[in-house]
Structures are given as structure tokens and as C-alpha cells.
Amino acid sequence: MTDKQLNTGSHDLPIPAALAEFMRGGWAGAAETAPAPLPVAAYAAKRRARLAERLPGERLVIPSGTLVARSNDDDHRFRAHSAFAYLTGAQQPDEVLVIEPSGEARLFLRPRPSRAESQEFYRDRRYGEFWVGRRPGLAEIEAAYQIECAPIESLPAALRGPARVLRGVDASVDALVSPADGDAELAAVLAELRLVKDEWEIAELQQAVDATVRGFEDVVRALPAAIAHPRGERYVEGVFGLRSRLEGNAVGYQSIVASGAHACVLHWIRNDGRLDPAETLLLDAGVEGDNLYTADVTRTLPLSGRFGPVQRQVYDLVYEAQTAAIAALRPGARFRDFHETAMRVISDGLVEWGLLTRAQAGAGLHRRYTLCSSGHMLGLDVHDCARARAETYLDGVLEEGQVLTVEPGLYLQPDDLTLPPELRGIGVRIEDDLVITADGARLMSSALPRQADDIEEWMSALAG
């Protein structure tokens, strides 16, 4: 980048020649260190090798992504594209991984310019060290991530000739290579490689889950203050968000903090309602760790500390459905089996309640009250591996090392006249994270209670 291309913003002051000259020198110097390889580096190298084996003899291009403006010249906090993070461990914007037909990999990135030769360090509000902090140099990246690095300016020359590109991540990279039929396959393969987690990924996910458990504990302790606040849902969101930033990168997705009938809105993220002690609170939240792996947990909590009779009736049915679904998890089982198991329990319960006839349940009419599937893969994305082909994911079978959620729910809308008045406006979801093992599944979020009596006891203990 030349100084004519600096991102100076709307309130940048003119730089007199004397000041520019004064800024060139007198600095102590920032010698590059040679950090030890990061733990992720060895795993990322294996992942790149597997990708090259899946698409042999191809040049593969995976960008990290670009900064995105939130408002005018204020950017959102950057998060690297999950496929790029998976293959490198790196998290900086405007970087590009290129895997050559030979399998050799190079990481193209922005070099840190000399202070004597560029004004970037104090004038560029997007990349300047005085604005956003020091970024590592090429040698430091090479040492930490164990990958050959090159200046981003040399990328166009490296992309002469055919290549498959992960498109829609960086428009400037898309423009360097003509679209090809193989681009869609690259995206699918990148998602499919992430279906089975390695040991490092499982450990990262467990750390995120453990931090999420502590976030839920924080929320329960804060409920008296949240109930007293006119925006109690926001209060809860803030309490959990603090834990996410203290122990990780951020929340892994927008927290759903849904009190009362808001729990019947699947993706309620306005989080602007009051908390009524007579109602329940559905909290769907997860900490994203520093290496971008996220937990995804939901609990439905009685705000009074005790479930009412009807609340417990609904909760117990969802709990039974989730318990049966968890028992269906094992290597070789179809991915759809656990959802179908949960829905059989739900539909049988709705028949027992008199809400559906057996014929209506057989026709799938329970879906009026359940709305969505009962789980998904989990990893770098909360809905992980979403671009995997159906035959390898939704229509595939479970394998040891896969991590997924099990989250059946009942959403009884407040204006649904097929329901008796006492059931209207109750929403319950119970969601846990599990890793498939050799003979079943391990409940990663077992530190949080699931059963109604246990939840009441847990809340009482935290209330002191």
C-alpha cells in the first residue's frame, strides 16, 4: 500500500512536511521475534494435506476475509472465515492461503511497512499500528504458524492460471481468478473436512462449553438484578457477554434471551423485554473461544426459581424427548435418527395431552409446535459444516469425533387457538453439546443440569 492509499478517515488532519519528517525517525525499533510454533500449527498442516489429497493437482485459494464497515469509517471487529482459520489457525484480515498443485502452501499477507518509508503506522486507521495495534511480520507468522509467507502484493502473480477459489469471502481475490465449476466443490469439501473433529478441536470446544457453563451460572446469580431492570433480557445478555469476552473471543452467535412468550420466537435476539418472575426464561448462548470454536447451549429456567405445574408439564416432555434423542447417538446411526426419536416422544406427548389425534401425529402435524430440527453440527461455526453435501451430513451417518447439538423444543404460540389458554405463550428448548464416541456420545455440557428438579436445586444453590 502506498501512502496515497492510506485509510485516513474523515477527520484526519493534514500532515505538514516537517511533521512527516519528524515521524520517520526516533523510534526504538521493533525487531521481529521468532515465536514458538502455536499448538494449532501441526493440526492445520495435516488439514491442508487432507484438502490437497481430496482435490489433487489443483491450485486452491482460501481468503481470510476483509474488514467490514459497521458505520462510515468504523469497522466491525474482524473474525476470520472459518475455513481459513481451520487451515491456518491465523485470524488476520486480508490474508490469503494458496495451496499449489504440488500440495505446497503459502500464506499471503500484508507486511508491516517500515516506519521510515511509510506513514501507515500513525495515519492509517484500519491498519496503522497506532490505531489498531502492532501486527506480526512475515517471519513471525512463519514461525508461529509453520507456513511459508509472502507479501500480499505478490498474490496476483501467484494466481496466474486456473484455480479453485472459496468465493464470496474477499471480492478482490474473486476478481483475480475467473469463476469455475470447481469452486462449489471446494466449498463443499472444506465443509466436509470439518465434520469430524481432531483432538485439538474437541479440546477447544470443551473449553468453550466449560466457559459457557460459567456464563449460565453468572446469569442465574444476576437474575434478581435483571428482574428488577426494565430491560431484563438485555441485562442477562450483558452478563453472559461479559463472561464470553473474559474467557474467549466473544459470543459465538447472537445470544437469544427470551422471556415469556418471546421464547416462542426461535431467533429472538432483540432481547429488550422485561423478566416476569411468573414466567420462564429461555437462554440460548455460547462462548466462542480465542481460536473461534463455539459452544451452543440452551436452558429454559423458571424465573421464580420454581416451575409452575403447566411449565413443568411442557418442560418434562421436552426433557424426555431430549433424553431419548441423546440415547440414539452412536457411530453408524443416521444423522436424522436423533431428531426423529425426539419428535416421536413429542408427538406422543401431544396426543396424550389431547392436542393431536393419533392420525394427526402420524401426518406430522406436531411440527406446528416444534417448527425446526433438533440439532446440528458444531465447531468453528455454530451451525457448522453447513455447505457439506447432503449425502455426507444430513443424509449421512454419525462418526466418532463429530460434535453436535441436541435441542428439541416446544413453541406454543401465544395466539394459537388450537391450544388451551394455559399452554399459550410457553416456549421450552433444552440444548446440549455432545461428541460422538466409539460406543455412543459424551455430554460435553453435563455440568449444567437438565432435569427440572435439578435445575431448581441448582438455581437455589447459586442464589445463596
Image (cartoon, rainbow, N blue to C red):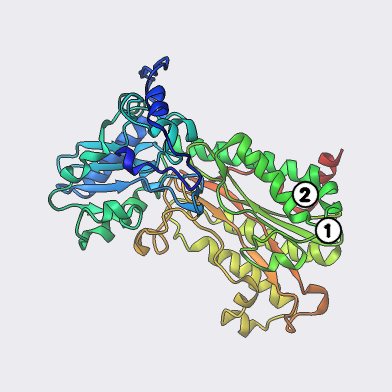
The vertical placement of 300 against 88, above or below, is: below
Q: Which residue is mark 1?
A: 307
Report the front residue among 69 and 145: 69
Q: Is residue 51 visible?
A: yes
Q: Is residue 464 left or right of residue 157?
A: right
Circles 1 and 2: CB distance less than 8 Å?
yes
At 75% from the left and 80% from the top, the residue drawn is: 419
Amino acid type of the residue that numbered disc 2 sits on in the rendered structure: Ile
Q: Which residue is mark 2?
A: 455
Q: Is residue 416 above or below residue 434?
A: below
> Where is 116 relative to 93, above or below?
above
Residue type highlighted by circle 1 = Phe
Residue at the image position 42 percent from the left and 45 percent from the top: 80
Mark 1, secondary structure of its residue: loop
Note whether 260 is above or below 46 in the view shown.
Answer: below
> Closer to the camera, 376 or 37?
37
Q: Position of residue 364 (x, y in %)?
A: 57, 79
